[in-house]
Image (cartoon, helix red, strand yellow):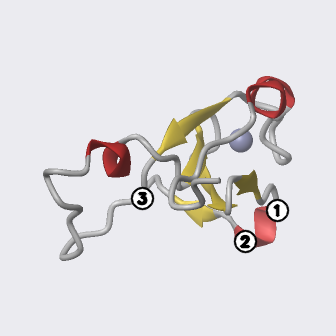
């Protein structure tokens, strides 16, 4: 098993919604300035590290491929 990638199960990805506004969540990678992935590792740019809600602009973390859909743990992305 390759544990280095964080991918979300397709069936799970299809049913989850923002717990706050029930909006659709989009895959996103966290902006980790100063810790850029190796250019020789394309998988690093495709692994999902958070799910962002386009409606209320909250970003939910993904821990080991499991989305943590808790408003308390979400990060605001609207500035
Ligand atoms: Zn939302």
Q: In this view, does 78 lie above or below 74?
A: above
Q: Circle 1 sits on which residue?
A: 70
Q: Which residue is drawn at 65% across and 53% down?
A: 1
Residue 12 drawn at (x, y percent): 83, 33
Please tell me in which quadrant of the rendered image residue 56 appears. top right
For disc 3, the marked residue is 30
Q: Name the residue under label 2.
A: 73
The Cα–Cα distance between marks 2 and 3, rounded to whole angstroms, is 14 Å
Spatial CA distance of label 1 from label 3 is 17 Å
Alpha-carbon neighbours of circle 2 within 10 Å: few (<14), some, or many (≥20)?
Answer: few
State the image quarter where residue 21 is shown.
Answer: top right
Side of 26 relative to 18 (left or right) = left
Secondary structure found at label 3 = loop
Label located before the other in sequence (1 or 3): 3
Q: Where is residue 49 in the image (x, y as percent from the top left)?
A: 53, 55
41 and 66: which is toward the camera = 41
Q: What element carries label 1?
A: loop
Q: Residue at x 78, y 71 (%)?
A: 72
């Amino acid at each position: 098993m390759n544990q280095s990638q964080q991918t979300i199960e397709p069936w799970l990805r299809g049913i989850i919604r923002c717990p706050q506004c029930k909006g659709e969540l989009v895959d996103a990678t966290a902006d980790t300035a100063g810790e850029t992935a190796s250019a020789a590792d394309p998988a690093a740019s495709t692994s999902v590290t958070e799910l962002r809600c386009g409606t209320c602009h909250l970003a939910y973390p993904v821990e080991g491929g499991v989305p943590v859909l808790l408003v308390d743990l979400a990060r605001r992305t609207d500035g």
